[in-house]
Image: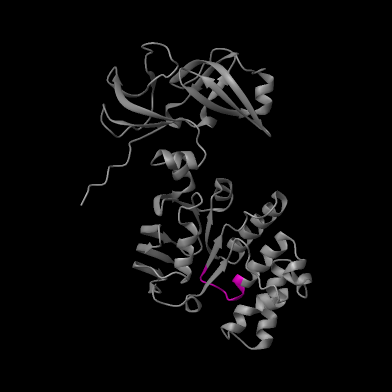
Amino acid sequence: MLDICGLNLRLDDFNLRDINLKVRAGEYYIILGPTGSGKTVLLEALAGLRPIDSGQILFSGQDVTGLPPEERNIGMVYQDYALFPHLTVKENIAYGLKKRKMGESQWIEAQIGRLGEFLNIDHLMKRYPINLSGGEKQRVALARALAIKPQLLLLDEPLSALDRQSKRRIQGELRRIHKELEQTILHITHDMEEALSLGDKVAVMEGGKIVQAGTLTEVFQKPVNPFVAGFVGHDNIFNARVGKRNGEKVVLVDKISGVAAAPELEFSVSAIDVPAGSNGFLLIPAEGIILSTSPIQSSARNLFFATVISLEKVGIITHVTLDMGIPIVATITSNSAQDMKIQSGCCLYAACKATSLHFFSPPPTPRSL
């Protein structure tokens, strides 16, 4: 439904560079990235609020690159909601419909009524934005954006200003809008939890570029570089190189424990598609590490003996930092940590399967022109 082809946009000290992205009709697509990566600038370019320097924006095959915002059939919800303070909820929702002269007053009234009931804001119609909670403002902003029946709904960090309870409620509303209205949604955020909760696909932005795009599983399990791996929440990313043992490829990681001439740690990793001698990075998922107080009888080919450096309890999970010659974080349930009586200084056995590890080469260095 949305096809972005070679989009470039230059601002004072920031550029969007060679943005290429395809979003299918009915998809919930997440643009993920840190503050300053260009997410909001990209959304504003799609909405027609910022002219681009080169490239194309296509909606269902139609080139909309040069069209003004009101002719693009896009709904947009801003991070700060951008409700008109001098208009009631009803007037805010009706604004786009009247501005675009989309129907007679009776049809507009019916459309507002349907959205009010759908988003459970029909009792708020006579209120002004100053008298609404954050969650109520968000639902009103969604109703205003949906009123024009947009081809594409753009969401700019829609949950960042909400408390946890309101955030969960609005996440539920967004899932319902996506499913019941079959609405195509492009949602930008810096929160991986939001992406996992809502998205069908995800693209990760860094410094004005899309550095990886794909399904949530692909991006989370097989990041293309250390930035993506760290941003989606992985702790264990190490410089590594490919070696050989008994004719099989293995991944070697330098030990940094301070022991003179300490040998490299050796990991069996499935599906290494680069030759021996290649340098790169090894990702060891924290949730893929099995811990035990006794020797592990496991089919896992990576078995280690480790000392606990520290523990961090976060609700029902605990992050255990281990010294295996390199510091590695394992994630287990807090109940398991308590049952095993894990504490700093104790020794544990650790195992991780070759299929859970991911070796990736650094991206090629761009050639100078």
Q: Quadrant of the N terminus?
A: bottom left
Residue at 54%, 21% in the rendered image: 322
Bounds of the magenta segment? 145-152
* Residue 10: quadrant of the picture: bottom left
Q: Residue furthest top?
A: 260
* Residue 128: quadrant of the picture: bottom right
Residue at 69%, 87% in the rendered image: 106
Asked if 182 appears above or below 258 in the picture, the reply is below
Asked if 322 appears above or below 283 in the picture, the reply is above
Mark count = 0
Residue at 49%, 32% in the rendered image: 285
Residue at 39%, 76% in the rendered image: 66
* Residue 174: quadrant of the picture: bottom right
Q: Is residue 151 magenta?
A: yes
Q: Position of residue 196 (x, y in %)?
A: 55, 47
Asked if 20 appears above or below 363 in the picture, the reply is below
- Comparing 39 with 168, the one in front is 39
- Comparing 238 with 360, the one in front is 238
Q: Is residue 113 in sight in this rendering? A: no
Q: Position of residue 294 (x, y in %)?
A: 58, 12
Q: Position of residue 216 (x, y in %)?
A: 49, 47
Q: Residue furthest front?
A: 12
Colour basis = one colour
Q: Residue furthest bottom?
A: 104
Task: Classify residue 87 as left or right of residue 46.
Answer: right
Q: Is residue 238 in sight in this rendering? A: yes
Q: Position of residue 283 (x, y in %)?
A: 43, 32
Asked if 90 appears above or below 217 in the picture, the reply is below
Q: Is residue 57 magenta?
A: no
